[in-house]
Image (cartoon, rainbow, N blue to C red):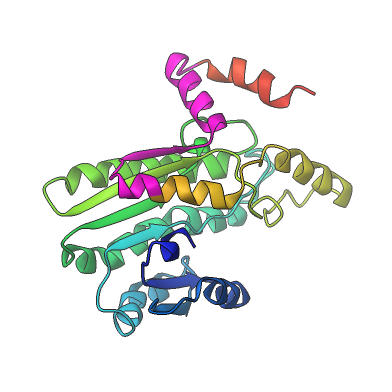
């Protein structure tokens, strides 16, 4: 939506076709070309074929935003291996494969940028989030190394670290199979209490960061505070942040 307001033509990709239809309808405007594409970013072959589908509808690609993400709560011992792999296949491999697929088109652009959504949990690692933190730290490391590799090209890389954004990620998260329904609901409500910033506000911060060619974008005062504490206390930050986050 933020990009559409700026007149960007868009190729929207989502595994949720109903969401694609709603979004395309909401951003429709005269002169704006919006194409819709059903895509599962964990599907290696589908991602590899996706650029061809995009260029069939658009003249080229200048901006790639990798923001597909899912959540998985529970300690490492509680989380099943197949659930761990499910999350990593979307949160990390989706970013890597989409980047690999679109790099040739981005090299053809006069001024291109890759925007990868990490998380504040790509800078700090709270307990109960081993899979999510692993994927988001991986996105951060991948993005920073890729930026250095592309520094002499016309492709920039922005990595985004949002704090608590009021999306549906918690409502759609997977929880340990050993939990009861009441435990699941209590856990979701606890996580959702940290999600305060409207997505519309977050998107404007991200897009402004892209416009200013920022290498790193911290979204929200909570993300900035936690990143600051992590810099001051890189090993023991959770001694402070844990007490603040979970006090009642």
The residue shown at (79%, 48%) is 178
**Frontmost residue, 190 versus 76:** 190
- Residue 198 appears in view: yes
Examine the structure image and report whether residue 19 is included in the region drawn in magenta: no
In the picture as drawn, the residue positioned furthest to the front comes out as 30
| Direction from residue 71 to residue 97 in the image, left or right | left
Task: Name the residue at the bottom extreme.
Answer: 56
Numbered marks: total: 0
The image quarter containing residue 70 is bottom right
Residue 246 vertical position relative to residue 232 in the rendered view, above or below:
below
Q: Which residues are magenta?
A: 208-235
Residue 127 location, quadrant:
top right
What residue is at 38 percent from the left and 47 percent from the top?
208
Q: Position of residue 55 (x, y in %)?
A: 29, 80
Q: Position of residue 27 (x, y in %)?
A: 51, 71
Please indicate whether residue 99 sits to the left or right of residue 177 in the image: left
Q: Who is closer to the viewer here, 51 or 27?
A: 27
Residue 225 forms part of the magenta stretch: yes
Closer to us: 160 or 144 = 160
Please determine whether, in this image, residue 93 is positioned above or below residue 183. below
Quadrant where the C terminus lies?
top right
Lateral position of residue 228 relative to residue 152, left or right: right
Task: Please name whichever residue, 4 or 170, is drawn nearer the observer in this view of the structure.
Answer: 4
Query: Residue shown at 39%/78% (left/top)?
Result: 33
Residue 179 shows up from this direction: no
């Amino acid at each position: 939506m933020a990009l559409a307001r700026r007149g960007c033509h868009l190729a929207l990709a989502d595994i949720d076709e109903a969401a694609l239809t709603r979004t395309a309808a909401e951003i429709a405007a005269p002169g704006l070309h919006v194409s819709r594409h059903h895509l599962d970013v964990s599907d290696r072959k589908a991602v590899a074929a996706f650029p061809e589908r995009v260029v069939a509808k658009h003249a080229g690609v200048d901006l790639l935003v990798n923001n597909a993400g899912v959540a998985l709560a529970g300690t490492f011992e509680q989380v099943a291996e197949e659930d761990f792999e499910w999350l990593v296949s979307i949160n990390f491999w989706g970013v890597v494969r989409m980047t690999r697929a679109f790099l040739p088109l981005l090299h053809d652009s006069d001024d291109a940028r890759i925007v990868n959504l990490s998380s504040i949990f790509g800078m700090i690692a709270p307990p109960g989030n081993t899979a999510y933190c692993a994927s988001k730290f991986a996105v951060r490391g991948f993005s920073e190394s890729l930026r250095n590799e592309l520094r002499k090209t016309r492709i920039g890389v922005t990595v985004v670290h949002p704090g608590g954004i009021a999306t549906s990620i918690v409502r759609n998260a997977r929880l340990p199979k050993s939990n009861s329904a009441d435990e699941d609901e209590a856990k979701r409500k606890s996580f959702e209490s940290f999600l305060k910033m409207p997505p519309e506000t977050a998107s404007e911060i991200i897009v402004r960061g892209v416009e200013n060619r920022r290498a790193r974008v911290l979204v929200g005062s909570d993300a900035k505070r936690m990143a600051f504490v992590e810099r001051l206390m890189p090993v023991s930050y959770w001694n402070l942040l844990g007490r603040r986050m979970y006090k009642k």
